[in-house]
Image (cartoon, helix red, strand yellow):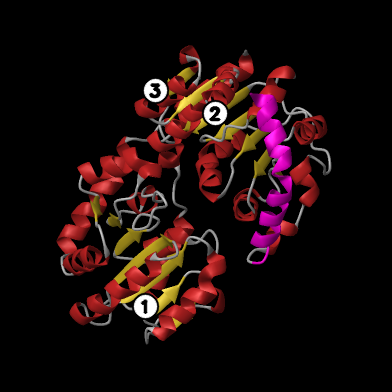
């Protein structure tokens, strides 16, 4: 089955190159380091610990693990990503401390070249990207491979099950799996992972500490906006959601005069079009890259890595990718700051986390623009309720930390073996 998969992958390469070129129209980063996509590029220090984080969210999940390993000087380290935004996030977090590369596409020749140039002593993959040829190549070279912070939604598991003859043999060759939840562990075992190699360690994102500088910058921005103005943020929004958020905003402004909206699209390359949309709705808009005019109706976040600052400046958060069929985004980011959060019903990417935060009262689910409108108005008018929700979220995060230590124990056992 892996041979057929490889043939199909080679056959798809013209489309893959076309898609890369198409994406480069919005992000020129897709045209950089093209050789690395095929396993070329400069060599790295032999015996490095390779950490693969596909994009921004996975890089963030890798932060607690890499921080402790860097402190303990376990390096050298090689951080691989698949997207320019992930690479930029890695550079902002680990500049000068780790070597960065793109992980090549899962072609046998590309993987062989990559491993020959990097010769890692262990490969750590964040969350769950199953690349059969990479797993096979690591096993053939006796390079231990471990999945950490691993998660597998019911929808993804169903997709893998349709091709179980391809993915089950690959998962069976993985040396260790550190899963986020019991449900993730069960789905991974059902997909093909060896039960004795799977352990539940929790979500390392719960161990991420918000830098004091981010909190201070958020408080400064809030002061500039004005202590008397209510501020809500719609973060990580996708196409189709900004329209719903702006529909809600027009009605919220009627009930909460002077209210300020911070709007942060998931993909910052869409900021120009969103700014035009805001202006067509009759609101003043100010972009972060141009220096916020805090008196504007809508502040548009169009930078990378500043979401904690913008959350810290807000009274209430809506986390996007959830009113459209994306699967939701990270609800921990507002929770760790004590910011009450709203989410749409589409949270399959973080279903366990969303359910847990909703159960303790830190998150409320809204189902459409009208529901979003009413809930935002209700909470902006009720500071006591916002405070209780925020504290419930903060306490949930604090009481569920420790995934980093449990995951590091799995990594240490693998390295020692």
Please, is residue 223 above or below residue 359 in the view?
below
First in sequence: mark 3 vs mark 1: 3
Specify start and end residues of the magenta stretch as a single range.
1-25
Q: Nearer the viewer, residue 75 or 325?
A: 325
Looking at the rendered structure, the secondary structure element under dot 3 is: helix
First in sequence: mark 2 vs mark 1: 2
Residue highlighted by disc 3: 186
* Disc on res. 147: 2
Residue depth check, mark 3 versus mark 2: number of the one nearer the observer: 3
* Residue that appears at 52% across and 27% down: 408
Separation of disc 3 and disc 2 at Cα? 15 Å
* Image quarter in which the N terminus is found: top right
* Disc on res. 225: 1
Residue depth check, mark 2 versus mark 1: number of the one nearer the observer: 2
* Residue that appears at 70% across and 63% down: 28
* Residue that appears at 74% across and 58% down: 31
Separation of disc 3 and disc 1 at Cα? 47 Å
| Crowd rating for badge 1 (residues with CA inside 10 Å; few <14, some 14–19, many 20+) | many
């Amino acid at each position: 089955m892996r041979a057929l998969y490889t043939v199909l992958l080679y056959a798809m390469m013209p489309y893959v190159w076309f898609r890369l070129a198409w994406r480069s129209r919005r992000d020129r980063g897709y045209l950089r380091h093209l050789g690395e996509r095929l396993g070329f590029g400069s060599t790295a220090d032999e015996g490095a610990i390779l950490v693969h984080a596909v994009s921004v969210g996975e890089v963030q999940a890798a932060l607690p693990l890499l921080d402790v390993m860097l402190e303990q000087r376990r390096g050298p380290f090689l951080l691989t990503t698949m997207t320019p935004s992930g690479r930029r996030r890695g550079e902002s977090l680990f500049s000068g401390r780790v070597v960065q590369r793109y992980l090549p596409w899962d072609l046998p020749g590309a993987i062989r070249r990559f491993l020959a140039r990097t010769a890692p002593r262990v490969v750590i993959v964040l969350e769950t990207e199953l690349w059969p040829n990479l797993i096979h190549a690591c096993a053939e070279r006796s390079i231990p491979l471990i999945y950490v912070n691993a998660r597998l939604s019911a929808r993804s598991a169903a997709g893998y099950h349709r091709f179980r003859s391809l993915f089950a043999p690959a998962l069976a060759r993985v040396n260790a799996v550190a899963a986020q939840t019991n449900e993730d562990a069960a789905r991974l075992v059902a997909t093909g992972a060896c039960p004795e190699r799977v352990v539940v360690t929790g979500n390392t994102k719960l161990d991420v500490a918000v830098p004091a500088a981010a909190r201070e910058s958020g408080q400064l921005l809030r002061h500039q906006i004005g202590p008397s103005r209510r501020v809500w943020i719609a973060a990580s929004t996708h196409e189709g959601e900004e329209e719903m958020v702006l529909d809600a905003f027009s009605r919220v402004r009627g009930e909460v005069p002077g209210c300020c909206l911070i709007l942060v699209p998931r993909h910052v390359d869409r900021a120009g079009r969103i700014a035009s949309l805001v202006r067509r709705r009759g609101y003043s808009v100010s972009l972060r890259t141009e220096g916020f005019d805090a008196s504007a109706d809508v502040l548009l976040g169009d930078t990378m890595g500043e979401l904690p600052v913008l959350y810290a400046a807000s009274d209430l958060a809506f986390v996007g990718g959830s009113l459209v069929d994306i699967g939701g985004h990270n609800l921990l980011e507002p929770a760790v700051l004590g910011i009450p959060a709203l989410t749409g019903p589409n949270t399959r990417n973080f279903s366990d986390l969303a359910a847990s935060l909703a159960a303790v009262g830190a998150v409320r689910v809204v189902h459409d623009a009208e529901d979003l409108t009413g809930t935002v108005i209700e909470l902006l008018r009720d500071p006591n309720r916002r405070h209780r929700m925020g504290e419930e979220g903060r306490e949930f995060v604090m009481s569920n930390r420790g995934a980093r230590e449990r995951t590091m124990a799995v990594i240490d056992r693998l390295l020692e073996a």
